[in-house]
Image (spheres, helix red, strand yellow):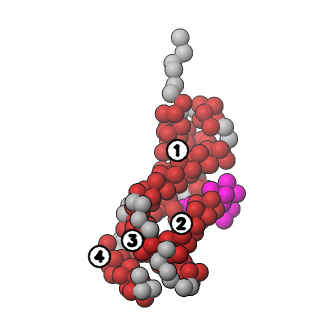
């Protein structure tokens, strides 16, 4: 009798393998063969569960993005205005670990050449922009577009500080920059 394989479990394992490879070497290194090797499986077992490479990437990245969105919403916690905005931005900068930040960096770099990654990143960015815009609108700030740009540049910059000379900025240092930004935006 053939062994029963839990497809949800296999899909999660494939996603974990994709993320591990991408974090270590970028999305260009993610191949069906590399995923199969990481799992100690055959390439046909991988393609049976998720199809081709684009579907492997889409499934893994979508799963990761949905997990990050859920964490972000939990950080906002139903708050609106400045409190919700602080929750979201501080979550993005202070909460995720190096692995998550490396995945986002790999995703941003990979999206330049991989249409499937670009589509998933664009979808997340649409959600992020709308969420930030709505939270800013609830603060009463007049120049939402500029405030959004300041927030985006600050978040991106503070995430990248995690890669400075191989050692990330401390949470206290990042928090000082966030406090200066909140003060400048009068939030």
Disc 4 or disc 2, which is closer to the eye?
2
Task: Confirm or deny contact between disc 2 and disc 1 (CB under 8 A).
Answer: no
Image height of 80 relative to 8, above or below = below
Q: Earlier in the sequence, mark 3 or mark 1?
A: 1
Classify mark 2: helix, strand or loop.
helix
Label 4 crowd bin: few (<14), some (14–19), many (20+), radius 10 Å: few
Is residue 162 at all visible to an observer of this figure? no
Task: Confirm or deny contact between disc 3 and disc 1 (CB under 8 A).
Answer: no
Which residue, given by chain and number where applicable, does mark 4 sit on? 172
Residue 41, percent across and down?
Answer: 53, 33
What's the residue at 57%, 50% (across, down)? 62
Q: Main secondary structure of the magenta part?
A: helix
Residue 143, percent across and down?
Answer: 56, 85
Task: Classify residue 138 as left or right of residue 168.
Answer: right
Which residue, given by chain and number where applicable, does mark 2 sit on? 131
Q: CA distance from mark 4 to mark 2?
A: 26 Å
The answer to which image quadrant residue 84 occupies is bottom left
What's the residue at 66%, 37% (across, down)? 51
Task: Confirm or deny contact between disc 4 and disc 2 (CB under 8 A).
Answer: no
Which residue, given by chain and number where applicable, does mark 1 sit on? 15
């Amino acid at each position: 009798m053939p062994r029963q394989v839990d497809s949800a479990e296999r899909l999660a394992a494939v996603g974990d393998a994709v993320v591990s490879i991408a974090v270590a070497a970028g999305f260009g290194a993610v191949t069906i063969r590399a995923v199969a090797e990481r799992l100690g499986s055959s390439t046909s077992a991988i393609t049976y569960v998720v199809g081709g490479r684009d579907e492997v990437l889409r499934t893994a990245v979508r799963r990761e993005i949905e997990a990050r969105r859920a964490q972000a919403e939990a950080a906002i916690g139903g708050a609106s205005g400045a409190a919700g905005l602080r929750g979201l931005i501080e979550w993005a900068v202070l909460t995720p670990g190096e692995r998550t930040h490396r995945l986002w960096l790999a995703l941003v770099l990979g999206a330049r050449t991989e249409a499937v990654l670009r589509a998933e990143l664009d979808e997340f960015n649409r959600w992020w922009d709308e969420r930030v815009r709505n939270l800013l609108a609830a603060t009463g700030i007049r120049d939402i577009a500029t405030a959004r740009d300041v927030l985006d540049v600050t978040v991106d910059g503070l995430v990248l500080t995690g890669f400075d000379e191989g050692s990330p900025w401390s949470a206290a240092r990042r928090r000082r920059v966030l406090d200066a930004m909140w003060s400048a935006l009068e939030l």
